[in-house]
Each structure stands twice: as structure tokens, then as C-alpha cells.
Amino acid sequence: MSLLKEAFEKGEFAVTAEMAPPKGIDFTHLIECAKAIKGRVHGVNVTDFQSATLKATSLATCRILQEQGLEPVLQITGRDRNRIAIQGELLSAGVFGIENVLALTGDHTTVGDHPGAMPVYDLDSVGILQAASALMGGKDMSGNELAGTPKYFLGACVTPRYDPVELQVLKMKKKIKAGARFFQTQAVYDMETLRNFRELTKNLDAKLMVGIVPLKSAGMAKYMNNNVPGIFVPDELIERLKAAEDKVKEGIKIAGEFIKAVREEGLCDGAHIMAIGAEENVPAILDEAGL
């Protein structure tokens, strides 16, 4: 059983951190960042060509982190592979004993560094979950028998601050039916959004991890408010960042305080930290959160 699944079953507050593969083959920095949180998190998410940008693959990076003694969470999108390639990737993860899988539809290629690349989208996140569930049942999506059956702990994403939020809850139900057992949210910065979402989803059969993206400046907060759907940074946090002498340090403090408050109020089953290019700050966030 994966550490992440075991933590949920024990009722522990689960923690995962996101690690982006390098754009190249030098994994030195990534491995250093991963080692710094070894034993402090239940899983390490490895992004899959995040924001449609070319990097080393999620599966290869998961394997490297696994060799360093960390438990990986394989992220896989439907943007770059058809159902044959997706099932092949999932089977390969199974060969390596990688159980945690996070299914995503994926950003369109026009937002990445190869805007002329042709997206695939043969399967969306629900389709990927269905494919993984079929493989766990010993057959591929066409009903062909497998020689050896993989085991996965499946997850997906959700946006708590979505209008109307009821559509997100409906999509969560579809993902749960397809096999999702845990959800990691889009970044949340206010407790009220999380309280409302917890109330709406409290009867669903899946664990919820709040997404944490540490803010680096007031400008970053304003940009996210204006350009990233589903994100809301309250004015009080923006003012706090403006007044701070060391804005990165203040963002780390804000992130840690939020995780601590969420944990104390029991609004989520865990937290997922997305440092986005500043993975070296994850230990400081964990320190601030008391984890």
C-alpha cells in the first residue's frame, strides 16, 4: 500500500509536494530538493510537461525520486498521448511499483514553449482514471487480458473557487466513479472558500488535499487574481506582502500559517504544496506549518 493511501486510512494529515522535472538531464537540484523533504511528506508529485513545456518525463523523474527513497505521485495528462500511450505509461509505472497516479486533462499546447505542437486529448482526466481502473481490473480499455495486474491509488484535481462550484462537485463525482480516491485542489488562499467547499463535498467518498502555492510578491498575487481562473488572493494578504521587507519569506510564512489553520479546523485531509520553481522553499513551509 502506498504511504499516501496509508496516511489517509490512518486519519493522518497527509502532505505532498510538487517537483518539476528539469528542462535537460541534470537532476542535481531536483534530487537535493527532494532529499530535503524526505521523511517529511507522504508523496512527491512529479509534473507531466507542466504548462505544456518540454521537460524530462514524469515517469523517468518518478523513478529517480523512488531510487532516492521518496514515494512519487505520477502525474499524467491526456494532452500528449493517445489511449495506447497512456495505458503503456501506466503499465510502466506499475512495473516500477509506482502506485500513486494523478490524472489531469492538461493545458493546451498553445500556452507552452512549443505552441505549434499538436495536442492529442484522446482521453481527459476522467478517461485516464477509467483506463487506470480497467488496468487494475486486469484488462486494457479494449477488454484485452493483461499478463500481470498493476495496483494504483488514483487521484485528480478540483477547483474549490469555481462559479458555479456545483459543476466542480458534479465533476468530482464523475472522477470518483471513474476511480479517484483523493483530490488535490487548485491553490486556495482564504478559509471561507475551503469551509464552503468542505461542506459541499463532505459526503463524497474521497480525500481532499488543499493546494498551496506560496506567494512571492504582491504583483504575483494580483496577477493570479486577474489571470488564473479559480484563484482568489484576499486584499489583506496582498497588503501584507507589500509591507514585507522579504516578500518571499513572507509568502512562505503565509503558506505555512494557512496549512496550520486548515489542519487545526479539519477542513481537509491533507495539503499539497506547489512551490512552482522554488522547491527549495518547501522545507521552510513545512517548518512554518509545524509539519
Image: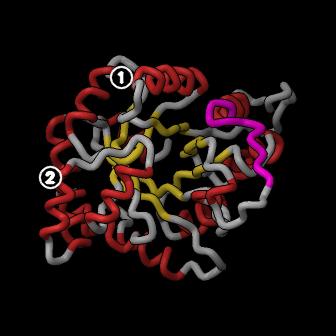
- Counting labels gives 2
Range shown magenta = 118-127
Q: Is residue 25 above or below residue 194?
A: below
Q: Is residue 76 visible?
A: no
- Would you name the residue on which mark 2 appears? 236
For the C terminus, which image quadrant?
A: bottom left
Closer to the chain start, of discs 2 and 1, is 1
Say which of 111 and 106 sits in front: 111
Along the horizontal axis of the image, is 272 left or right of 191?
Answer: right
Near mark 2 (Cα within 10 A), the count class, few <14, some 14-19 or many ≥20, is few
Along the horizontal axis of the image, is 242 left or right of 193?
Answer: left
At 42% across and 45% down in the image, what residue appears?
4
Q: Is residue 205 above or below residue 25?
A: above
Percent of width and height locating residue 13: 28, 43
Along the horizontal axis of the image, is 235 left or right of 65?
Answer: left
Residue 201 numbered tag: 1
Task: Find the distance from the CA under tag 2 to the CA under tag 1.
Answer: 27 Å
Along the horizontal axis of the image, is 117 left or right of 241?
Answer: right
